[in-house]
Amino acid sequence: MNKIFAVAAVVIKELYRRKDFYVLFILTALITGLMWLMNFFHDEQIVRFIKEICLMLIWVCSLVIAVTTAARQIPAERESRTIFPLLAKPITRWQVMVGKFLGCWLATGVALLVFYIFVALVSASREHTLSVDAYFQAFWLHWQMLGIVIAMTMLGSVTLSVAANMTIIFIVSIGILVMGGFLHKLAERMTEPSASLLTAIYFIIPHLELFNMRELIIHDWTGANLPRWTDVLGDTVYGLAYSAFFLIAACLVFRRKALN
């Protein structure tokens, strides 16, 4: 485990030394400007709309950071040929892969936590209310979703080029978030064998939309309106299972991958 955490620590340091880190400041400034607009409006619908914009920015930015960071981990090591001295040490390929995943996931989680804390504090200063449970559930499930995306990207990084990997992951992730929950309904209107194929896809794909809890914050849900903690636990197990599946697949492919 020490070797895995050592690789993860290097990934975290590299991430915050790159330009990705400064995206945090740009987005934070943008969110600040949007949240300050609450001072000029007293319409509840407008306030909710502004919060929705802020949260959408967080989702977009976190997805970009997660995919771009994970996609270049292994290819960058191969191009710079630093993968060879790394593997010359008493460390296996699967430890490198798991360490890279863990580093990307933790670094993205820290960035995500900063976003949510900032939005929570600014929103509380304007609305004088704060549902800690809602913000925590939204953050936690968002982070689990990013774990799945990062694991998928790590798998793509050992099978595709960086550009192709990022493009495919972005399209797949956004497609699932937008349409994933409606595939079975769409299949009902189709003829065979298309209907069966679409239904199979519906049950196979990781449903990233299940982790979208922005409505909790936008509509200030509290108490009984919040999802049960058992449901949050179930979604967490669901997310970890898919992350593990893609990560194991990435380790198996990387194990057989020629590095020269």
Image: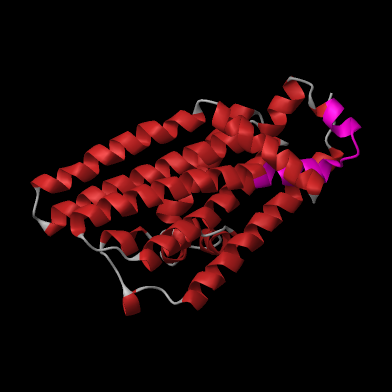
Where residue 106 appears, as percent x and y from the top left, is 59, 47
Q: Which of 215 and 115 is in front in this view?
A: 115
As for residue 67 lying within the magenta part, the answer is no
Which residue is painted at 59% across and 52% down in the image? Answer: 148
| Colour treatment of the image | secondary structure
Above or below: residue 128 compared with residue 55: below
Residue at the farthest top position: 80
Q: What secondary structure do most residues of the magenta stretch adopt?
A: helix
Where residue 161 appears, as percent x and y from the top left, is 66, 28
Horizontal placement of 140 versus 73: left or right?
left
Where residue 46 appears, as percent x and y from the top left, is 14, 52
Which residue is painted at 37% across and 64% down in the image? Answer: 132
Q: Which of 255 and 236 is in front in this view?
A: 236
As for residue 89 lying within the magenta part, the answer is yes
How many discs appear? 0
Residue at the farthest bottom position: 224
Residue 259 visible in the picture: no
Above or below: residue 118 compared with residue 260: below
Horizontal placement of 230 versus 81: left or right?
left
Horizontal placement of 93 versus 49: left or right?
right
Which residue is painted at 87% across and 42% down in the image? Answer: 92
Snapshot quadrant of residue 57:
top left
Which residue is painted at 32% across and 66% down in the image? Answer: 131
Residue 260 visible in the picture: yes
Where residue 177 appears, as percent x and y from the top left, is 44, 53
Horizontal placement of 15 versus 114: left or right?
right
Residue range in magenta is 84-102
Q: In which quarter of the image is the C terminus?
A: top right
